[in-house]
């Protein structure tokens, strides 16, 4: 090939071989399978023992429990004004079975709003208890004498809690702790005097209070269950106590929930574009991954069977400060035997790590399925991004015991269903439309059950923002 010259400028060097861009048209590229950012570790699904549920329903039989109340009170906020919902006053143990809506509405009107600041004392240890506090917003510590005379935090309560209700039935009740505000907040206060004045006028309320006061004490154990009478350490031939184990008359039943979708694939794609990987198989793989992500989300957040909603109120605690500290994690562990795992949002785990660093503590790690997982007191802390974070940058940490044999938390499914591709997950052919589109119904059946109340505990309102 000749080189042309003109105007003293040398021409560009000509191409001497096939360009890579052109060669790629004749080459077979190396491809990955379709990738998906939504896939997470899904530790909850991996670590829960799964129970096969035949018939789609799982019944949890428990010993009869006499525990009442312990619920949370809900409020309505209009601007800066806060009012208690009248029916929510029935969460107080004294009013648990009381149903006169007119009287409850008048009680709600008698509740006086009190705004408080951090550090303010709401009650004083040893003084007469003459009012009930309904905590609408904020965090309050109940401080009483410790075993060696020093002050100790006996309990921390937050939004929806109440305290001081003993004064409604005991005229001589005293405050056994000092209630000190940790944060600013709002409470509604019902005085015992207003309650008694209304009871004097309302026959139904007076009769209800008299019935509660005169009712014989129920024989229960420390957990509120019907006690089993036993005798031990005796000699001779005394008459032994007779007993029986009473059960709940209406045990809770868990029905399997489901997540479903319809996968559509054009016949042209399914027929012609299946090398080197099957298009239908890859579509199904990614669809099942999305179903599993939704399954874990529902098992954490579903209002019917989700773990966050099924933790009993007496198994929910508040952090001493704001961020999750080793003290908080120890208290959460101490509430149950045989804890098998913590479940926390990755940002909550990071916040706990910062608190450990601040104290010079270095939690151990353990190998779980080839992954190093942080532990506390030997219990692994698994990340779960399905646990929500509020607008105030607070979240929750769950601690649970697992397995039927341990009366813990279990996952529920039904393996062996028709057209099953994974346990309790099926793919059913639905036909081909007139537009030549193949449809598959993809379904996953699942649920979760808490066998006894202390199997699951929650550390609520954990602050995850980094301190300034």
Image: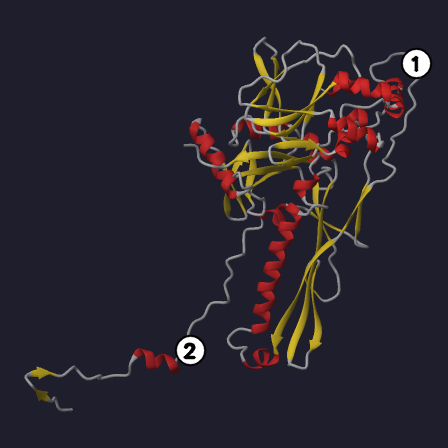
Image quadrant holding the N terminus, namely bottom left
Tell me where residue 100 appears, x and y as whole percent.
85, 31
Quarter of the rendering containing residue 207: top right
- Front residue of 97/318: it is 97
Quarter of the rendering containing residue 268: bottom right
- Front residue of 157/118: it is 118
Q: What residue lies at 92% left-to-right and 14% top-to-bottom?
A: 238
Q: What residue lies at 73% left-to-right and 24% top-to-bottom?
A: 110
Label 1–label 2 contact, CB within 8 A = no
Pointer 1: what residue?
238
Looking at marks 1 and 2 on the same chain, the residue that comes earlier in the sequence is marked by 2
Q: What residue lies at 56% left-to-right and 73% top-to-bottom?
A: 279
Query: What is the number of callouts on the image?
Result: 2
Marking on residue 28: 2
Image quadrant holding the C terminus, namely top left
Q: Secondary structure at mark 2?
A: loop
Marking on residue 330: none
Residue 54 seen from this side:
yes
């Amino acid at each position: 090939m000749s080189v042309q010259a003109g105007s003293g400028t040398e021409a560009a060097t000509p191409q001497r071989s096939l360009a890579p861009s052109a060669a790629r048209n004749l080459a077979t590229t190396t491809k990955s399978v379709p990738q998906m950012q939504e896939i997470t570790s899904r530790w909850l699904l991996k670590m829960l023992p799964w129970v096969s549920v035949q018939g789609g329903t799982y019944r949890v039989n428990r010993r009869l429990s006499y525990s009442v109340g312990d619920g949370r009170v809900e409020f309505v906020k209009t601007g800066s004004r806060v009012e208690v919902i009248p029916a929510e006053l029935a969460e107080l143990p004294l009013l648990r079975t009381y149903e006169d809506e007119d009287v409850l509405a008048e009680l709600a009107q008698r509740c006086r709003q009190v705004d408080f600041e951090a550090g303010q004392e709401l009650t004083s240890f040893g003084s007469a208890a003459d009012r009930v506090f309904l905590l609408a917003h904020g965090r309050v510590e109940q401080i009483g004498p410790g075993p060696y005379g020093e002050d100790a935090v006996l309990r921390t309560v937050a939004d929806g809690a109440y305290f001081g209700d003993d004064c409604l039935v005991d005229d001589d009740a005293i405050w056994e702790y000092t209630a000190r505000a940790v944060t600013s907040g709002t409470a509604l206060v019902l005085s015992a005097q207003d309650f008694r004045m209304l009871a004097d006028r309302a026959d139904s309320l007076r009769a209800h209070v008299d019935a509660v006061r005169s009712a014989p004490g129920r024989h229960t154990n420390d957990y509120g269950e019907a006690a089993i009478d036993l005798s031990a350490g005796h000699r001779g031939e005394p008459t032994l106590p007779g007993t029986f184990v009473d059960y709940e008359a209406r045990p809770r039943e868990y029905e399997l929930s489901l997540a479903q979708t319809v996968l559509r694939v054009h016949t042209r794609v399914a027929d012609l574009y299946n090398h080197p990987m099957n298009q239908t198989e890859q579509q199904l793989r990614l669809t099942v991954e999305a179903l599993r992500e939704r399954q874990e989300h529902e098992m954490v957040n579903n209002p019917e069977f989700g773990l966050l909603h099924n933790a009993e109120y007496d198994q929910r605690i508040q952090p001493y400060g704001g961020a999750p500290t080793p003290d908080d994690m120890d208290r959460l562990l101490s509430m149950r035997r045989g804890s098998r795992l913590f479940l926390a949002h990755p940002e909550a785990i990071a916040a706990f790590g910062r608190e450990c660093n601040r104290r010079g503590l270095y939690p151990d790690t353990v190998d779980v399925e080839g992954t190093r997982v942080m532990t506390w007191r030997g219990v692994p802390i698994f990340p779960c991004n399905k646990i929500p974070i509020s607008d105030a940058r607070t979240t929750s940490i769950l601690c649970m015991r697992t397995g039927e044999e341990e009366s813990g938390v279990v996952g529920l499914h039904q393996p062996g269903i028709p057209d099953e591709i994974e346990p309790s997950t099926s793919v059913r052919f639905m036909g081909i439309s007139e537009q030549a589109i193949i449809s598959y119904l993809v379904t996953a059946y699942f649920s979760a059950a808490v066998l006894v109340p202390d199997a699951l505990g929650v550390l609520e309102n954990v602050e995850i923002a980094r301190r300034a």
